[in-house]
């Protein structure tokens, strides 16, 4: 199915969980924050939240800033 | 946070020690610093200040006032509406214990007084009452203000303390300023001097200026009655109170008055004597501590002293005052709250100010400026 | 000990540092450590999913430094609030450096959106440290809204020009009931000292530490600058003497009889 991650379109398997997506991107769950369709997910929700076609995700992390 | 929380951090004995233990070097340092802290303000209240140091402080006070206020002096008139009162303040001419003719002006009398004052040139009037809500309460004041507003664009009140809602009502009626003195900030002495009546509630009165600020009054005036109690600590607390109001109700102009005990009916003797030198010092120290506060000197003080204090930070003065209800029309000599000392008429005051190079301001503000009706 | 108190928490250091623009993570860590700082700012950005970088967090000792996420990138209040919520979801303490900078050229803070965002964030329980123009009236509005500090800029971000807004910052310091942190534009330790001498409660420095060849040394220098300025302020700087004003004595009347 097609989903949107950080503004880019991405093809992923159906019934993908957020934590699985994070793993597949070689990211660590405790170092990122995820917004699913404009709703911030708690870390528990990473494993329970199932993605559906057309979902929009923002995955952000801390970087240097003033 | 209320001022009640702040004042509790400065117990009277500690304040007195802070002031009395000040060294000459500390006074010098305070005079030399660009901005006073609470502690260095206390230093400048020290009775140990030398004549030379006082002169330096006066020069700074003069300079700061000139910078912030130019050479303007706002002229206002007190208008006593009623001398009825249920409080038993031991030092006041209107005390419920005193025998004098109690009078509350009728609306036509109010109009007469306001007209007289207007003809004298006043556009800023300060309305005064005692504390007798059934005779001269909020409703009465609303009626009075409505009349007076025809003759004068800026009305302040110096009456019994109100709830915030009461002050909002006053604003709606056209009042833009509030004056209320704590008399003394010494809680124990306060209890002693106000043995009965609503005024015996120290906390309620202390928080009145804040309630005025919350209600949105443009001007708030405070002061302590110098001579009632320990003048050093009262001067300190007055400064502290003014600072709190200025920082918290930052849209409001804060003014500080320096009423010194005068003889009153009932023969109350001031507990301490604040001499001219000390009064001068208080005024200058307040100016250095609060460069933007209005400083008020009324006709309680004699002409010579007022003339001499003029360059040292004063920005508001009354003239030709009468402290009895109806006194402008009746020339009532008997039922006054206190004796005045500077008997110059408003016209004489104006002439004098101009001769000294000052700028007498009759009209500084008018609520009509805000009116959409124009 | 003269400590800085923000939102009920005390700190020994009055120098906050930013973590942006460093040439390497090592340079950043050197600056942080040698500055003696206890509060560091970080930003939030989209992960580059094609090329994910190591998280910054792995380089920051959370026991030593309080993380202060900023809302840089926000162009309005809504975006700022969203970023703050994201940061909080990352497990940070709910402290936020509120930064709303719609103008990408000078990165000047938007006063209107900043106040709006501050009001919203305070209601949501954040400890808000707002980056703002050196506007004394705005500072009182923000304080009234419940922010934990005010952070007026010394000069536009990254310009290293120093305390250009000096006169207005002096008014803010005079009138504030909350700590005043001079943020942005401080390019040299002397600038930081100047801000502290004026009575600022703390300063925030980033570019000056990142722009140098030796971040550790520059951080040490800034640390000393901040400490020097603070100590001078506490000792009580004298005012610059003006010419004598009154030619005749003002208090002579007290001595006549």
Image (cartoon, coloured by chain):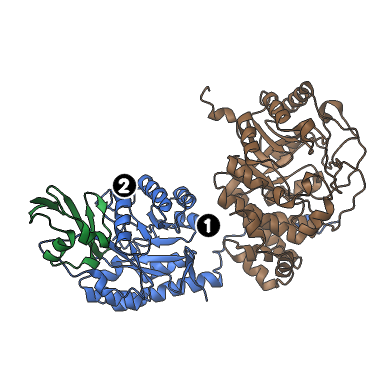
Q: Mark 2 lies on which chain?
A: C
Palette colour of chain C: blue
Quarter of the figure with the C terminus of chain C: bottom right
Palette colour of chain A: green
Residue B60 shows up from this direction: no
Q: Residue B338 carries which label?
A: none
Palette colour of chain B: brown
Residue B82: x, y in percent?
A: 80, 33
Residue B209: x, y in percent?
A: 65, 46
Q: In this view, does C167 lie above or below C240?
A: above
Are labels 2 and 1 on one chain? yes
The image quarter in which residue B251 lies: top right
Q: Which chain carries label 1?
A: C
Task: Name the residue that disc number 1 marks.
Answer: C177
Residue B57 shows up from this direction: yes
- Residue at 84% across / 43% down in the picture? B341
């Amino acid at each position: 199915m097609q989903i949107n991650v950080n503004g880019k379109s991405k093809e992923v398997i159906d019934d993908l969980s957020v934590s699985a997506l994070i793993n597949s991107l070689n990211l660590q769950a405790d170092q990122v924050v995820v917004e699913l369709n404009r709703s911030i997910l708690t870390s528990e929700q990473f494993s329970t939240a199932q993605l559906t076609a057309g979902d929009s995700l923002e995955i952000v992390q801390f970087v240097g800033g003033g | 946070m209320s001022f009640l929380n702040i004042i509790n951090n400065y117990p009277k004995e500690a304040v007195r020690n802070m002031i009395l233990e000040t060294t000459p070097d500390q006074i010098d340092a305070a005079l030399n610093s660009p901005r006073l802290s609470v502690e260095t303000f206390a230093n400048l209240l020290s009775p140990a200040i030398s004549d030379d140091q006082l002169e330096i402080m006066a020069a700074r006070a003069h300079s700061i006032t000139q910078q912030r206020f130019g050479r303007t002096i706002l002229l206002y008139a007190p208008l006593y509406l009623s001398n009825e009162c249920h409080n038993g303040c031991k030092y006041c001419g209107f005390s419920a214990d005193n025998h004098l003719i109690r009078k509350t002006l009728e609306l036509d009398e109010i109009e007469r007084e306001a007209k007289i004052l207007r003809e004298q040139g006043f556009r800023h009037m300060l309305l005064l009452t005692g504390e007798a809500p059934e005779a001269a309460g909020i409703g009465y004041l609303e009626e009075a203000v409505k009349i007076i507003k025809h003759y004068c664009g800026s009305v302040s009140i110096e009456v019994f303390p109100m709830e915030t809602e009461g002050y909002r009502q006053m604003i709606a009626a056209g009042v833009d300023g509030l004056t209320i003195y704590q008399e003394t900030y010494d809680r124990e002495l306060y209890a002693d001097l106000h043995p009965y009546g609503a005024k015996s509630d120290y906390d309620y009165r202390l928080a009145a200026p804040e309630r005025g600020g919350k209600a949105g009054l443009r001007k708030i005036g405070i002061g302590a009655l110098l001579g009632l109690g320990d003048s050093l600590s009262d001067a300190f607390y007055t400064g502290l109170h003014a600072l709190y109001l200025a920082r918290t109700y930052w849209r409001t102009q804060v003014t500080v008055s320096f009423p010194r005990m005068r003889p009153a009916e009932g023969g109350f003797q001031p507990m301490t004597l604040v001499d001219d030198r000390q009064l001068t010092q208080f005024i200058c120290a307040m100016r250095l501590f609060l460069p933007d506060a209005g400083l008020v000197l009324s006709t309680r003080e004699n002409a010579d002293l007022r003339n001499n204090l003029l360059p040292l930070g004063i920005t508001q003065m009354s003239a030709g005052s009468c402290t009895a209800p109806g006194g402008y029309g009746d020339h009532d000599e008997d039922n006054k709250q206190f004796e005045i000392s500077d008997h110059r008429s408003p016209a004489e005051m104006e002439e004098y100010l101009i001769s000294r190079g000052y700028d007498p301001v009759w009209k500084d503000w008018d609520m009509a400026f805000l009116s959409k009706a124009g | 000990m003269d400590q800085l108190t923000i939102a009920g928490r005390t700190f020994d250091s009055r120098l906050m540092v930013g973590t942006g623009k460093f040439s390497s993570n090592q340079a950043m860590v050197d600056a942080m450590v040698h500055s003696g700082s206890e509060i560091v700012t970080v930003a939030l950005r989209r992960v580059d999913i094609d090329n994910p970088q190591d998280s910054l967090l792995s380089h920051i000792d959370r026991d030593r430094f309080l993380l202060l996420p900023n809302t840089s990138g926000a162009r309005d209040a809504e975006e700022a609030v969203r970023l703050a919520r994201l940061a909080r979801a990352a497990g940070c303490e709910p402290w936020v450096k509120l930064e709303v900078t719609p103008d990408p050229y000078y990165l000047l803070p938007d006063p209107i959106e900043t106040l709006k965002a501050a009001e919203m964030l305070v209601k949501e329980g954040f400890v808000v440290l707002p980056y703002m123009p050196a506007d004394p009236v705005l500072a009182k509005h923000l304080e009234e809204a419940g922010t934990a500090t005010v952070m007026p800029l010394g000069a536009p971000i990254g310009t290293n020009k120093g305390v250009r807004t000096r006169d207005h910052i002096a008014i803010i310091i005079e009138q504030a009931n909350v700590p005043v942190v001079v943020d942005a534009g401080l390019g040299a330790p002397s600038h930081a000292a100047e801000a502290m001498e004026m009575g600022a409660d703390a300063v925030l420095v980033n570019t000056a530490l990142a722009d140098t060849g030796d971040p550790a040394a520059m951080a040490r220098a800034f640390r000393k600058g901040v400490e020097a300025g603070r100590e001078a302020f506490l000792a009580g700087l004298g005012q610059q003497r003006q010419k004598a004003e009154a030619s005749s004595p003002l208090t002579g009347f007290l001595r006549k009889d």
